[in-house]
Image (cartoon, helix red, strand yellow):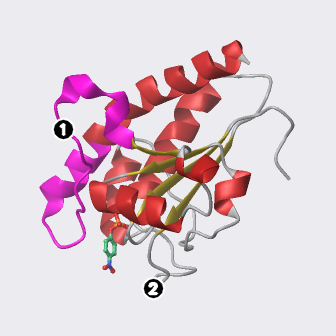
Amino acid sequence: MKPENAPAILFVCLGNICRSPTAESVFRAKVDALKLETPFTIDSAGILGVHEGALADARMRRHATQRGYHLESKSRQVTVADFDHFDYIVGMDKQNYRDLIARAPSAEAKKKVSLLLSYAPELSRSEVPDPYYGGEAGFEDVLDLIEQACDPLLQHILTAQHRK
Ligand code: 4NP
């Protein structure tokens, strides 16, 4: 059950085993550091359901652990109910964004969908690239981008909360 008035954020990538579990963990660490009164609901999911129930990719977990993030979530697919439950549905790349918009059940639900790097225009990157078929550097790139974009995302959400 979602706490009253607490924002709920869902991070989404293709498989929910690399990028979105990382974003979930990094964002949770940033929220925890603020010691807010109202706890945020933070989760992640995948466009695909092929890795349902699996822990994050071992390479992603290893790179994340080196920066102090312990990825514990298990992969699950995005559901129609997510568009009702979550206030912010944040994709990692443009295809995730398009797939989320296509699955959103209403115009109201479509408004909840955004792209993570849109909150950090100064990075001059629009997507967190899929690291799955690449080398080790790809996992570091994922962490660098997510760490930098989670701060402005959190500020954006806190500002929106204060306006309510
Ligand atoms: P993710 O990476 O979307 O960052 O979790 C991927 C993981 C698995 C697959 C694709 C992307 N896959 O096709 O199995």
Q: Is residue 97 shown above or below 146?
A: below
Q: From the viewer's perspective, is 155 left or right of 161?
A: left
51 falls in the magenta region: no
* Cβ of mark 2 under 8 A from ligand 1: yes
128 falls in the magenta region: yes
Provide the secondary structure element on which disc 1 rests: loop
Q: Residue at x 46, y 66 (%)?
A: 102
In the image, which residues are magenta? Answer: 116-143
Amino acid type at mark 1? Arg
Q: Which residue is mark 2?
A: 50
The quadrant of the rendering that contains the C terminus is: top right
Q: Which residue is mark 1?
A: 125
Outermost residue toward the front in this view:
107
What is the quadrant of residue 81 in the picture?
bottom right
**Disc nearest the viewer among 2 and 1:** 1
> Disc number at residue 24?
none
